[in-house]
C-alpha cells in the first residue's frame, strides 16, 4: 500500500521543484527494506514528501498473488496510490524500477520525474541482467528454508559492504513478520524476465543510477536503459546492487543535482 498523502504534488519555482515521491522496491522486498535511507532522504529534502508502496506478494500486500507481468504490477501500483497527488516523482529499485518505468512510459501525465536504480530490462541480454556467476547462488537462495541464512545471503549478494548486523536483523525481522512466498518470488522473476520497454524518448525528466561494482546486475543494463530513454546515467564506482544501503549519500546527491528542491522558505502546498 502507498503511505502518506498531500495536497499538491509538484510546485515549480523557477527551475526548482517540490514534489511527492513514490518509492518502489525490488524482488521480494517491501517498503521497510528502504531502511534508514528513507529518513536520510526526507531529512535532506524537507520540503518534499516521500511514500512507499508494497507490490503484490510483499509487505502489506503479501497475501496477494504477484502478477506475472510488469504491466499488471504497474496497474496495481497506480490503483493503490490513487490517494496520492499527481504528478508523482517515481523512484524504483531493480524490479521496482521496471514498474516505475512502465508507469512513466504508459501514463507520463502521472509522473513528475523518474529515477531508476540498479534496474534492467529486455534491452539487455539475460547474462547481463543477472550475472552467470550468481545463478547458482540465486538457486540456493530459492531453496533455503532458514530465514536468517537466506536474508544474510541476500544481503551478502546485494551489498558490497561488510555485513551490518543491525541491517541483517532488520531484514530477518521483516521476513519473520511478513514472509514472502516462494511462488510469488518466482512469479516476480518471471515478470521481470519478460519486461522489455518500448524504446522511446521518455516524456518526463528521468535519471538512471547504477554501480560498476554491482555483482548481481551488469551496470551496462542501466546504460542500455539510459541510451534508449535518452536520459542521464550516473555510475557509482564501487557500491553493490543495493545502492540505498551501500551509497546512501551518493544517491541523495544525485537527486539533488538532477531534481533540485525548491528554495528554503517556499511552501509546497501553495
Image (cartoon, rainbow, N blue to C red):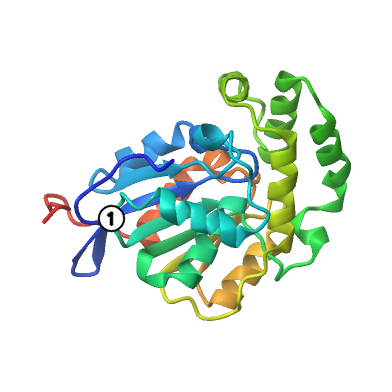
Q: Determine the residue positioned at 31% across, 38% down.
A: 43
Vertical placement of residue 158 versus 76, above or below: above
Is residue 69 among the parts visible in the rendering? yes
Q: How many marks?
A: 1
Q: Position of residue 227 (x, y in %)?
A: 60, 76
* Rendered position, 95 above or below 61: below
Image check: 216 left or right of 108?
right
Label 1 crowd (10 A; few <14 / some 14-19 / many >=20): some
Asked whether the viewer can see residue 235, the reply is: no
Report the quarter where the N terminus lies: top left
| Drawn side of residue 27 relative to residue 267, left or right | right
**Residue occupying the point 40% across, 43% down:** 2
Dividing the picture into quadrants, the one containing residue 38 is top left
Q: Nearer the viewer, residue 188 or 240?
A: 188
| Residue 192 point in image, percent of width and height | 69, 56
Image x and y of residue 23, in percent: 45, 47
Q: Which residue corresponds to the image point at 58% horizontal and 37% vertical from the top-left?
A: 58
Q: Mark 1 sits on what residue?
A: 85
The residue sitting at the bottom extreme is 200
**Most foreground residue, 185 or 206:** 185
Mark 1, secondary structure of its residue: loop
Q: Residue 59, image x and y in percent?
A: 54, 33
Residue 124 lies left or right of residue 260; in this view the side is right
**Residue 43, relative to residue 83: is it above or below?**
above
Quarter that holds the C terminus: bottom left
Q: Is residue 122 above or below residue 249?
A: below
Q: Nearer the viewer, residue 182 or 11?
A: 182
Amino acid at each position: 500500500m502507498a503511505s502518506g498523502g498531500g495536497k499538491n504534488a509538484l510546485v515549480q519555482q523557477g527551475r526548482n521543484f517540490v514534489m511527492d515521491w513514490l518509492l518502489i522496491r525490488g524482488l521480494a522486498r517491501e517498503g521497510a527494506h528502504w531502511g534508514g535511507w528513507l529518513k536520510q532522504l526526507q531529512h535532506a529534502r524537507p520540503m518534499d514528501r516521500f511514500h512507499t508502496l508494497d507490490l503484490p506478494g510483499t509487505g502489506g500486500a503479501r497475501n496477494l498473488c504477484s502478477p506475472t507481468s510488469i504491466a499488471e504490477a504497474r496497474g496495481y501500483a497506480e490503483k493503490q496510490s490513487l490517494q496520492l497527488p499527481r504528478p508523482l516523482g517515481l523512484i524504483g529499485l531493480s524490479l521496482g524500477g521496471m514498474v516505475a518505468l512502465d508507469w512513466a512510459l504508459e501514463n507520463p501525465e502521472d509522473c513528475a520525474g523518474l529515477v531508476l536504480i540498479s534496474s534492467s530490462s529486455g534491452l539487455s541480454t539475460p547474462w547481463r541482467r543477472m550475472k552467470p556467476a550468481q545463478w547458482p547462488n540465486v538457486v540456493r537462495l530459492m531453496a533455503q528454508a532458514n530465514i536468517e541464512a537466506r536474508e544474510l545471503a541476500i544481503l551478502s549478494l546485494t551489498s558490497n559492504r561488510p555485513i551490518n548486523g543491525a541491517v541483517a536483523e532488520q531484514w530477518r525481522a521483516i521476513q519473520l513478520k511478513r514472509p514472502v512466498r516462494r511462488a510469488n518470488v518466482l512469479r516476480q522473476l518471471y515478470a521481470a524476465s519478460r519486461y522489455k520497454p518500448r524504446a522511446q524518448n521518455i516524456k518526463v525528466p528521468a535519471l538512471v543510477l547504477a554501480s560498476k561494482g554491482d555483482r548481481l546486475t551488469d551496470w551496462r543494463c542501466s546504460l542500455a536503459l539510459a541510451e534508449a530513454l535518452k536520459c542521464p546515467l550516473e555510475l557509482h564506482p564501487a557500491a553493490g546492487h543495493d545502492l540505498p544501503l551501500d551509497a546512501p549519500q551518493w544517491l541523495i546527491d544525485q537527486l539533488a543535482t538532477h531534481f533540485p528542491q525548491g528554495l528554503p522558505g517556499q511552501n509546497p502546498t501553495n
